[in-house]
Amino acid sequence: MIELRSVSKVYDGVAVVDDVTLTLERGTLTAVVGTSGSGKSTLLRMVNRLVEPTSGQVLIDGAYTAVIAAPELRRKIGYVIQDHGLFPHWTAARNIGTVPVLLGWRRADVRSRVRELMEMLQLDPDVIGPRFPHELSGGQAQRVGVARALAARPELLLMDEPFGALDPVIRAQAQADLHRVQRRLGTTVILVTHDMAEAIRLADRIAVMRAGRIEQFAPPADIIAKPATPFVAELLGEGDRAFRYLSLKPAADVARPDGAAEGAADGPVLPGHATMAEALSEMIWTGRDRVRIANPDGDPGIVTREALIRAGRPE
Amino acid sequence: MFRTLMLSAAVTASFAGAASAQVVVSSKIDTEGGVLGNLILAVLDHAGIETENRVQLGATPVVRQALVAGEIDIYPEYTGNAAYFFNRAEEPIWRNAADAYAEAKKLDAEQNDLVWLTPAPANNTWGVAVRRDVAEPAGVTTFSQFGQWVAGGGNVKLAASSEFVNSAPALPAFQAAYGFTLSPEQLIVLSGGDTAATIQAASNQTSGANAAMVYGTDGQIAVSNLVVLEDDKNVQPVYQPAPVIRAETLAEHPQIEELLKPVFESLTLETLQELNGKVQVDGLPAADVAQEYLTANGLLK
Amino acid sequence: MRGGIRLLFLPLALSPLLPFAVFRANRIAQGEPRSLVETLGAGPAALAVAALAGGIAALAFARRPAWGAAIAAALILGIVLAAGWGASSLMAGVPTQARVSPGAGFWVALVAAALLLIDALARMRPRPALRLALVGFAVAAGALLLSSGALSQLSVMQEYRNRSAAFWREGASHLWLAFGSFAAAMLAGVPLGIALTRRAGARGSVLGLLTMLQTIPSMALFGMLIVPLGWLAANLPAAHALGIRGIGAAPAFVALFLYSLLPIVANTVAGITGVPRSVTEAADGMGLTRRQRLFHVDVPLALPVIITAARIVLVQNIGMATVGALIGAGGFGTFVFQGIGQTATDLILLGALPTVALASATSAVMDALIGMLPGGAR
Ligand SMILES: Nc1ncnc2c1ncn2[C@@H]1O[C@H](COP(=O)(O)OP(=O)(O)OP(=O)(O)O)[C@@H](O)[C@H]1O
Ligand SMILES: [Mg+2]
């Protein structure tokens, strides 16, 4: 559990982070969003003490971070940044092993941990491992950066716009990877991002920042359903908030058995985890008013346009 | 530059170096410095005085400063240079050999505890040398005779640097004192030319040159068959080489004065030209030239 | 061989028409040109021209750069040996004061062949290790050639023979001056540069002071050092025992040290501040201590820039150490300045040639070392 208690950072008389109090549960992914310069990075960097708070405290599992030696603290916290920051004179494998080596792990342990991580992130240890950073693609370098951050099995992972420089396809894959890894390892993650869709897709909770203050801290559905301030609403993009909302909910929630009153459907069967937004998109694209959706327990279900439109507006 | 060095010399003088048992013999880096320094070194060595060899140490300001600071004990210096050491270059006293020596000796004894020993009867000053095959028929050995000869229509063509031709204390001073004038056709001005170039020109009669700007004891003069004109009216400062020694060292080894006296007295203009020539022209090591001269002339007793 | 470099065949082919040697009655007399035939004799001269023609033809058809390099190297060897042999034959039966030095034809041929060699080597794109080996080979070949006696009648070698003991003594002081002051400057300059990266306030003034030092002419700096060093020698017996004096090697050493500081300090600062921000941020974020970051990240990444400064400083020191001769520090400059005093070109060359050779070899070795740094062409 991470607690920020009345944390502020003042630069030249300006509070770039202003009296922020937050509690983040273990094993959750919190996204921090906000306009540029709103203090997201500063907030993040106060957790691993790359920036020292001007006032307030940060606690991890009830312990004050201020009394732990900074290097020692940081070795327990993973840190990923946009430009990946790989050490250009070290191979990918050596980069990934940085923190385990600092912690004095045995060499064999470091080597097997590096292999394990590379395999988990779909990097071939024998091909990518010996390469230098300038011999990697952007996506590969980024995954090496994530592997490096996870190397010493941190319970907390800080990510500052980790996917900002990736193309949409690679980014989607990286997001999926992160989701998978986070669920599997139970790591607590703080993710700073500019991409609202990313935040909605990945986060358990979203903290919206503006001028150093938290405007709203809530689960994605609540943020979309009840933006606390006009700023939050604006950040969501008012035009497509219904689609954002639909994209959070599984279409299976509104499915009914096939052959019921409304009549039968034809066409392809959507996968069972498809969201309402995907179901609606399929209807528009194929010119139907109903689609089938796979049901692990029996025959495919039917989702109708009316049901989706009703569900797309929070009560 | 020179000034900076001399200034530091004055400062350094106040904390003269740690005395050591050996007599540190030094000299300037040029050819004559090599010859004279090795002469002194050989004489002291032969007399059983323990020496340290710092011959051909460096440029004039460096050697002078080293002596004043007590880092070396003895080196040969020219009387005329005292004019610059004591900032009195403009005074006429330096143009008379005996007066110049006496003044240099007095000033250094008073101010720096240095002793000027017996000088050589040779004057390594800026002047003119004429081809022997021209000078002898014309009966010219002094500047006065040269002046009369030129004024009387003597056929001379002088190779010189533009500095020598134009600067007031040089050729213009000679012309005024000895009553002659060289027309532009009688001058070959080698811009930036040094004495090596002017001597070569007169020696090879380049463009008809038959006289050259020289320094009196230059080693090239003898082999190039030139004779140096005597500055009989003392137009130029006199540059007689003499060993200069720290008074303290001399007190420890008083015999040095008498050891060096006959050696320097034997060094005439022609002798120095010849010794310098052996180093410069024949490429012999200065130490060998010095040793051979001393042995051949019975100066190592 | 292809392209514009073939234009060099022309001077190479025409060089036999120029005087191959210069004969002088003594070391400062005016030189008289001697043609190839006069120098070598008609028969050997014809052989030499034939060999040269053969070499040019072989170069023209050489397809691989390595062959071109080998042929050009052989040509250089041949030209130098011909000069040595020609000097012996010209010196036969004349007084020992006479001197023979290489003439215009020799120099034209040598420079053309050297440029062809450099071009071929450049096109070989040798790896750093091979470059080091080539430097070693060139040094060994030069040493063998000089010690074989094949060149002993050339004027520079005669100067050497007259002062061989002094040559090695001055060579040793030259190396000590140049490399010793360099080592001292590295030991002081790199830590100083590192300290300055952490105190941006002091950076400007320290670099400004070092820049000012660089602008002082070497003789003036030597002069300025005589006072404090003389004082130390006179008042601190320990300093005196360490060999510190107002004149001699100490002020030259200190002056070279001071001149070396600016490039080393400035490049250390530039190298370390040039480490990308994301890299230093990641290093801090991973939990490297300041010291760990310095030794594992900052210094390794700044190393190419620091070694570039080291190369500049070494070459500069090797050249500048010659001036030390004016304040009694010894070194190859002794021969240069004695030679100037005697207007004896050969003596000047006896000081200048080893200095140039030393500087070139050092520079080539440093280049190869820079190429060997991890990360390759970074
Ligand atoms: N070291 C510093 N000194 C002074 N001001 C700083 C410093 N670091 C950040 N700031 C200022 O603090 C404010 C917040 O910066 P921060 O980097 O936290 O913003 P951000 O929300 O991460 O912005 P972005 O989305 O552009 O990365 C900015 O106005 C920035 O200029
Ligand atoms: Mg930021």
Image: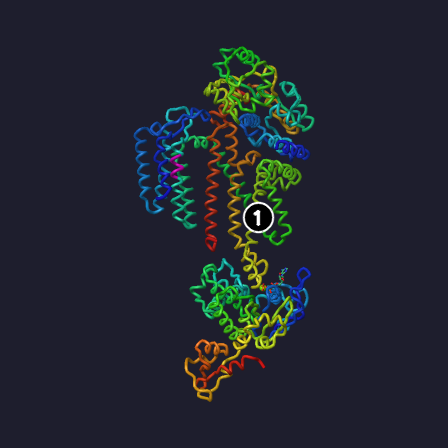
Instruction: Compare residues B75 and C255 and report the one nearer the observer.
Output: C255
Q: Name the residue under label 1.
A: C266
**Colour logic:** rainbow
Name the element at disc 1: helix
Tell me where residue C43 appears, x and y as whole percent.
Answer: 30, 30
Residue lying at the far front in this picture: please name it.
A287
Q: Quadrant of ligand 1?
A: bottom right
Report which quarter residue C74 is drawn in.
Answer: top left
Report which quarter residue C209 is drawn in.
Answer: top right
Q: Where does the magenta region start and end?
A: C108-113
Instruction: Compare residues A107 and A88 and report the one nearer the observer.
Output: A88
Tell me where residue A215 appears, x and y as whole percent.
Answer: 63, 71
Instruction: Compare residues C27 and A314 and report the one nearer the observer.
Output: A314
Magenta segment, prevailing SS (helix, strand or loop): helix
Q: Is residue B113 magenta?
A: no
* Image quarter of the C terminus of chain B: top right
**Compared with residue C358, is residue C341 higher up or lower down, i.e. above or below?**
above
